[in-house]
Image (spheres, rainbow, N blue to C red):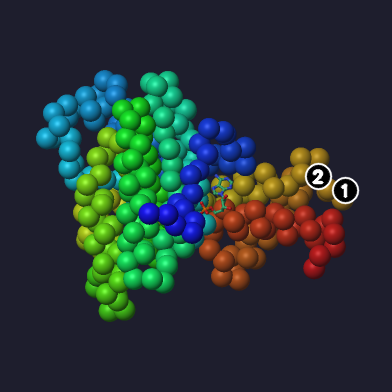
Amino acid sequence: MSFDSPPFTVRDLSGVDTQLIRVPTQEKFIGQMVNAMKYFFSRGDSSFSDHFSSMSESNNFPFKGFVLTGPPGSGKTEAVVEAGRRLYSELAMEGIEVKLLHISTADINRGRVGEMEQRLRSVFNEAKSEVRSSLRTILLFDDIDTLLMSRDDKRSEEWSVSLNATFFHEVDRLKTSDTMICATTNKTDMLDDAVKSRLSVKEAPAPSFEEMKIVARSALPLRGANGLTQDQLLELAAERILENQEAGEPDSFRLARKSAIEVLMKEVVGWE
Ligand SMILES: Nc1ncnc2c1ncn2[C@@H]1O[C@H](COP(=O)(O)OP(=O)(O)O)[C@@H](O)[C@H]1O
Ligand SMILES: [Mg+2]
């Protein structure tokens, strides 16, 4: 089966993202994902394969991964990719290679009947086709609520029921010691029991105000600008964050960076 475009994007995990600012709220959920995936993927002492060495125990283990839930811009997508990078470098020491396939709903969505199911199946086949004892795959289903409609949802059309069925069928066949799901969603209430019984729900709260200030600082020039020091610019950026919050913008990494850039544009370029 060949497609007009691949139903996923392979993310590069080999580098370090220098743009990423470490803040405690996000570090907590990144750390939880790294530890859990390491448990399932590693071959070392006290790993999953150490604890459940017989095939019957390890096949069909009911836990298939996570779903990270939190408001838009809380850094969920970024956190999964970062967890992938950390695993990539940690497991390289054991001779294990980690691969991350990023799946957006647009990668799956197609008009023709049956094509969406085929595209979805091919994602799982890609994870399986390369099963080598040294390869592990993370499937990032981004904004999974847009892919899977809740079964209770009255708008559910037949095609979405069939797509859901394909998804759960494939997920149930995954071996957690080779492949894990990391899904993200902004809509906690759209997660139905079928998802919750397979994926563990992890909260990804928005960054705090202090954390947003740290992120804002990283978007401001070290040597200041237009006669203002970086600290002075940061004061203005903090005020700007509060103004944007009052205008109804939710706390997020995006809000922090955007507010800093708005201040910079105002001071340097004279934007109003
Ligand atoms: N730790 C971080 N440091 C700097 N920027 C970040 C960090 N985490 C996320 N971002 C940026 O904030 C924006 C929103 O993050 P994203 O992961 O897309 O949020 P979500 O998936 O929760 O909506 C993106 O542009 C992302 O690159
Ligand atoms: Mg996202």
Left or right: residue 264 compared with residue 208 = right
Q: Is residue 30 above or below residue 199?
A: above
Which residue: 39% across, 36% down? 34
Q: Which residue is mark 2?
A: 224
Residue 27 visible in image: no
Which residue: 42% across, 20% down? 93
Left or right: residue 56 compared with residue 242 = left
| Quadrant occupied by the N terminus | bottom left
Residue 52 placement: quadrant? top left
Marking on residue 257 = none
The residue lying furthest to the front in this view is: 1
Q: Are marks 2 and 1 in contact (CB under 8 Å)?
A: yes
Name the one closer to the observer, 17 or 122: 122
Q: Secondary structure at mark 1?
A: loop
Q: Is residue 13 above or below residue 68?
A: above
Which residue: 32% across, 54% down? 121
Q: Is the CB of mark 2 within 8 Å of ligand 1? A: no
C-alpha gap between disc 2 and disc 1: 7 Å
The residue lying furthest to the right in this view is: 227
Q: How crowded is the residue under tag 2: few (<14 C-alpha within 10 Å), some, or many (20+)?
A: some
Q: Amino acid at mark 2?
A: Gly
Q: Which residue is mark 1?
A: 227
| Quadrant occupied by the C terminus | bottom right
Q: Amino acid at mark 1?
A: Gly
Total labels: the figure holds 2
Left or right: residue 74 compared with residue 269 = left
Left or right: residue 79 compared with residue 245 = left
The residue lying furthest to the bottom in this view is: 154
- Residue 165, given in percent of the width and then of the height, sits at 24, 62
Which residue: 60% across, 71% down? 247
